[in-house]
Image: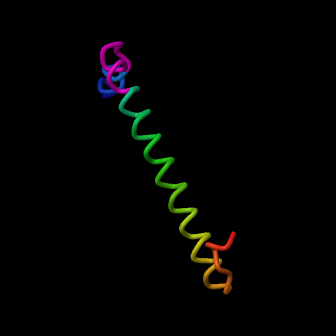
Amino acid sequence: MMEWFFHLLQPGTLALLIPILAIIGVFGNKALKAHHKHVERLAKINQGIDPDRE
């Protein structure tokens, strides 16, 4: 039943899985930061503030 989980915990599988998850995490973090910055920029524009003057 939980054989897949024990297979994930094998050193060979973890050696491949950890770097892949780290790369996905870094790109996901950068994407979220870019999205947040974009949303803030749109909010400033909607309030009549020129975001490029700052």
The single residue placed furthest to the top in the displayed view is: 11
The single residue placed furthest to the front in the displayed view is: 53
Instruction: Report the residue at 32% width, 23% height from top.
Output: 16
What secondary structure prevails in the magenta region? Answer: helix
Establish if 15 lies above or below 2.
above
The magenta stretch is: 9-17
| Residue 15 lies in the magenta stretch | yes
Nearest the viewer among 7 and 39 is: 39
Quarter occupied by residue 10? top left
Establish if 51 lies above or below 10.
below
Residue 21: give x, y in percent of width and height.
Answer: 40, 34
Nearest the viewer among 53 and 43 is: 53
Horizontal side of 7 relative to 51 (left or right) equals left
Instruction: Report the residue at 39% width, 27% height from top.
Output: 19
Way the structure is coloured: rainbow
Quarter occupied by residue 18? top left
Residue 26: give x, y in percent of width and height.
Answer: 47, 40
| Residue 23 lies in the magenta stretch | no
Which quadrant would the N terminus be assigned to in this image? top left
Horizontal side of 44 relative to 29 (left or right) equals right
Q: How many numbered dots are placed on residues in this image?
A: 0
Horizontal side of 11 relative to 36 (left or right) equals left
Which quadrant would the C terminus be assigned to in this image? bottom right
